[in-house]
Each structure stands twice: as structure tokens, then as C-alpha cells.
Amino acid sequence: MSGQGTVISGQRRKRDSHCLHFSRKTSRCAQVDSALESRHKGKLWLDHSIQGRRRFKRKTCSGFPGIEPVTVLPAPLRGGSVRGCRLLPQRFDHASSGEPVVNRALANAIVNQLTVSKNNLLRPSTWQSFDERDWERTLNWLDLSGLALYLRQRLEMTNCLSVLPHRVRERLDRCEADNRLRVATMTEELKILNDMFSRAGVEHLVLKGITLFPDYCPDPAIRTQYDHDFLIRLESVQRTEELLQAAGYRRKNSENEHPIVYYRPEPEVRFWADFVGFYSPRLGRSIELHFRLWESAAERIEINLPEDFFERASRRRWQDFEYMSLSVEDILIFQVLHAFRHVLRNWCRLSVFLEIAYFLNQRFSDSRFWKRFADRIDNLRWVPEATVVVFSLAELLFGAAIPPEIKARLTSASFPALALWTERYGRCSALANFRNDKYSLFLHREFVEDQAAWAGIRRQRLFPMHRPHRPPAAVFQRGFSRVEKLWVQGAHALRRLKFHAISALRYACEYPQWALLRRARLERN
């Protein structure tokens, strides 16, 4: 999760005319955060009484040909095998092991409650069937999925918030208040960065973040964001890096990596509880510089995007802030490719699909837009296929209705196999944010035509030889000693080794079944 790390210091520094000066704003945020901490001392230890799980039904809309609507109790909620596959994981864990397994029934209820179809909302009695122990096991998953504040807003709108246990409501309220301050602080940072780039003559477009409001998110304050993203021209890279370095930022990744990531090296801040770091305005933000919107080399999927993003850019305004962003069609293309890439890499937050589902619901009847979008992606290799995957997941998870203009225009010989993958693995993998299995390799294979290239990708993904990524910096926010950090990192490395071994075995066992089902689906279509 990029952007989690150190907090911006209040100390003054000497800078040139392009340097950023955040001390006054962040000092005020730190005072607010300290005041909130003093009001909420101690960790939210929840009771350990257990109630039985309740089953409930959920309906979804039918999607592209080959995807069957779910009109009965979802398989993950039934506790049995998923669509007949005994080897699919029947549970998923928190980000760090040693904590309780997530309550799957509650996780399913949360996803079902967030459907964009207002006709399928759950009754208040559903939430009464979950006690504080159930919530304790699921709250960390809720934070990592990016759904916590979306859930709070939906429960508040449907008058169900009061049904939740008191301490859970208190936690969600705290997170919402913190994130609102965080969004305000990040907006001020974005204004300064935008002004700095503009004064230096660096042509840039804002990506993600504020550009997703209001099409993808009804309120910026309920969306969690951890970095600033910009699209710049290749010839502006050196000048942009010089500006950031003069402003006190340092490069985080190597010279040959993309996107270019900068961060501000500051002392670590300590939070009174781990989850606070996900929402606190005191958590530092990194800056990601993109000069292209797809990495063909990493995935070995050749997508040659147009080079006219800047020519098609649009000016947007939020409150008193004006900025340049991608056109509406290009924002959707970027969101689709962003979600698709993260699915292939085994880490994609559920909130990404909720936001796309929200967009599909908002724009469903805008036939002119969908014609422009279809025209835009019609001749882009693999983009229609990626769009089918992402839209189908948004439909499967959150009940989004896919516009008929898209269904009619997008055709591909691989669509039946993509539909089968979504139907068989989509929901189960998505509920774990795609990080508990390697079934995305079945999907990845549909996009790689070269057999030798695919063999290399599969070997690398099944048995990665690089050092495991370190846990996010937010894990070390409460005064860990060096020995404790090494212990946590070592335990994390062992867990990753265990994950790779088990998931590789599951993949190998599932492969024959997938091959048979895929062949049958292709023959039928």
C-alpha cells in the first residue's frame, strides 16, 4: 500500500521559490489528531461473546454472456465448496497472521450492503446477528479493503448505523473524522504541488484521488487515499524530479522503476492504535509520477495506449481548486487498467470495484458517453478484454448494471473463458482482496500469447525469487524496537513463504479442473 510511512514534520526548512511549505497546515492537523487521541485512549478491545452466523440471500444482475446471475445464497457464505471446487480457500486472513480469521459471513454482508442497487439492501436484523467478536475479527479486513467509510455512510443513510455495537460505531466515527481531516490536508498539498508544477512550466494531469469525485465516489471524505498521482510528459521527468528534490522529497524506488515515487523523509509518528494510521492526516503521503499509463514489460501484455491524453485533457474544479485531469473516457480506461493490473498482481482492494460499480450505475443511461468510450477502446489491444473482466467483477460484487451499448460492442473469442474465470474465482478471490490465492494466473494466461513469455511469468509468480516485500510502515507506528521490527519482518517473510507454497499447490491441483471447464465453455460458445 503505497504512501504509508512517515509524517510531515512541523520544522521549518529553507527552500527556494518552488519548495513546499507544509509546517503550518500539518502542525494544525497534528494538534487535532492529538486531541482526538486523548479523547479515545486505549485500544478498542471488543467482547468475545459469539453468536451464530445468519444466512441471507443476495441477487445480482446477469452480465456478459457466460456469467450466470447469483440468485441463491452466495457459495462463500454457505461454508461449503465454491462452485464445486474443493480446493478453493474456504477462509481468508488478516494482513498480519496471528490475528483471528475474518468472519466470512460478516464480510459477505458488508459487500452485499454496499450494492449500488438500492433494491437489494439488507434488513437491520441482519446486522443484529453479528456481535462484537465478529466485528473484531473483520475490522482490519474492512480497513484494508477500503470499505469502512463507505459502509458507515451506507448504514447511516439506511438508518442501520445504530444497530452496530457501540464500540464499532465509535471506531467508524473516529475513522471518518480523521479521514475528513486527511482529505482536507491532502487537498491543500495537491494545490501546492499543482501550483509548483504549473509555475515551473511542467505540464501535468492529476490522476485518481480528487478526480474520482463525483463520478466514482459521492464524497471525497469517505475514500481512503495514500499518495498523489500525476501524469507528466517524458521530457518533463528530469525537471519534475528537480522540483521535488528542492522541496525536500527523496526518491523511493530505483531509477529503472515506473512510476517514479518520491517521499518526504521525516521522523516516524506513533499512533495509539494500528488502524488509526490508515486514516490519520499525520500519515505521510508519497508522490507518484507516471509518464505512461500501462507497464507492458511487467505483465507481458502489450497494450499500446494512445498518446493524446494531454490533448484530450479536461479542466475540473472542486470548491476553489482548479486542476487538469484526463477526459472522462480516459479516466475510466485508467481505472479499468489500474484494477486489472492489481488483480494480476494479487492485490486489489474491494473499494476499487465499488467505485467502478458506482460509476456504471451513475452513467448507465448516458448512451452518448458509452458510444464515445466504446469508440475509444475499440482498437486498443486487450483493453476491451480487461474492461469485461473489471466490469463483470463490479457487477458480481456490487450489482452494477453493465450498459447494453458496451455488451453489444465488445466482442472477443476469449470472452467465454474470461466469464468462466469471473464466475468461478471472482467473488471468492475478491473478498480476500485477491491476495490469498494465485488463481489470477488462469486469467493472466488469457492475455499472454507467447508460450515462452508465459512460462517465465508463471514461474516467477508461483515461485518468486526476490525478497518478500516488507510490511507497510503503518505496522511499525507504536514504538517498535529494532529487534521487534526484525522479528515482525522475519515472521512476515515466513508467512509469505508459506503462502507461496500453499497457493502454488492449490494452483497445481486446480489447474486440470480449470482446463477442462475452460475447454467445455469454449466449445459451448
Image: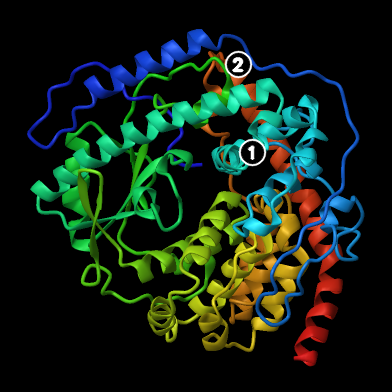
Q: Is residue 259 above or below residue 142?
A: below
Quadrant assignment for the C terminus? bottom right
Please give the name of the residue rendered at 35% of the width and 13% of the height, measured from the top-left corner. Answer: 31
Q: Is residue 117 left or right of residue 214?
A: right
User: Would you name the residue on which mark 1 appears?
Assistant: 142
User: Would you name the residue on which mark 2 appears?
Assistant: 483
Q: Is residue 19 left or right of residue 501?
A: left
Q: Is residue 201 above or below residue 228?
A: below
Q: In this rendered view, identify the residue nearer to me: 118 or 524.
A: 118
Please give the name of the residue rendered at 55% of the width and 64% of the height, measured from the top-left corner. Answer: 340
Question: Regarding mark 2 in the picture, which secondary structure is present there?
Answer: helix
Q: How many marks?
A: 2
Look at label 1 and name its amino acid: Leu
| Quadrant in which residue 354 is drawn | bottom right
Q: In this rendered view, identify the residue nearer to me: 242 or 335.
A: 335
Q: Is residue 36 above or below residue 446?
A: above
Q: Nearer the viewer, mark 1 or mark 2?
A: 1
Please give the name of the residue rendered at 45% of the width and 56% of the height, measured from the top-left corner. Answer: 216
Callout 2 crowding tier (Cα within 10 Å): few <14, some 14–19, many ≥20: few
